[in-house]
Image: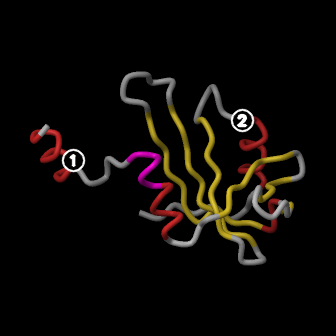
Amino acid sequence: MKLEHSISNKIPYLKSLTHSLNRSIERGYTENFKATERGLVSLESSIHYRPSDVEVVNFFRFEGVSDPADNSILYVIRAVDGAKGTLVDAYGVYSDPLVEKAMHEIESIHKNR
């Protein structure tokens, strides 16, 4: 256990989906978005957003430790009306085609380090 703790301290970029999601929530990204044929919808407010109404301010990919097919991606999203939230999807073979479609249509996608 001590070895794992010291390794994780030396490699800070190894973060989990849960950790990144919690950090996003702490920063005010509290809405949960879902992809639809029309774009994205906030599950809290039921407001629909066209791809031109949102920007992806950051995203994070995660790979499963024991199963390479266990991949996910977290999108951190801001809408034109100030709504801020996240969308989680599988990455690769198991990804949701509606999420893939929405992300291809969103013009503003950023990756912050």
Which region is colored magenta?
Answer: 16-20
Q: Which residue is mark 1?
A: 8
Q: Could you say where residue 63 lies in the image, as x and y percent from the top left?
A: 44, 35
Residue found 84% across the figure and 46% down from its top: 36
Residue nearest the viewer, comparing 72 with 92:
72
Q: Is residue 73 above or below residue 92?
A: below
Q: Could you say where residue 66 lies in the image, as x and y percent from the top left?
A: 37, 23
Q: Disc 1 vs disc 2: Cβ atoms closer than 8 Å?
A: no
Amino acid beneath label 1: Ser
Residue found 51% across the figure and 61% down from its top: 111
Amino acid beneath label 2: Asp
Q: Residues within 10 Å of mark 1 (few under 14, many from 20)?
A: few
Q: Secondary structure at mark 1?
A: helix
Q: Is residue 86 left or right of residue 60?
A: right
Q: Is residue 66 left or right of residue 107?
A: left
Lower sequence index among marks 1 and 2: 1
Q: Could you say where residue 96 lies in the image, as x and y percent from the top left?
A: 72, 35
Q: Which residue is mark 2?
A: 96
Residue found 26% across the figure and 54% down from its top: 12
Q: Secondary structure at mark 2?
A: loop
Quadrant the N terminus occupies: top left
Marks counted in the figure total: 2
Quadrant the C terminus occupies: bottom left
Q: Is residue 18 left or right of residue 94?
A: left
Residue situated furthest right in the rendering: 38
Q: Quadrant of residue 86?
A: bottom right
Q: Quadrant of residue 53?
A: bottom right
Q: Is residue 12 left or right of residue 104?
A: left
Residue 95 included in the magenta stretch of the image: no
Which-is-in-front pick, marks 1 and 2? Answer: 1
Q: Could you say where residue 17 lies in the image, as x and y percent from the top left?
A: 46, 46
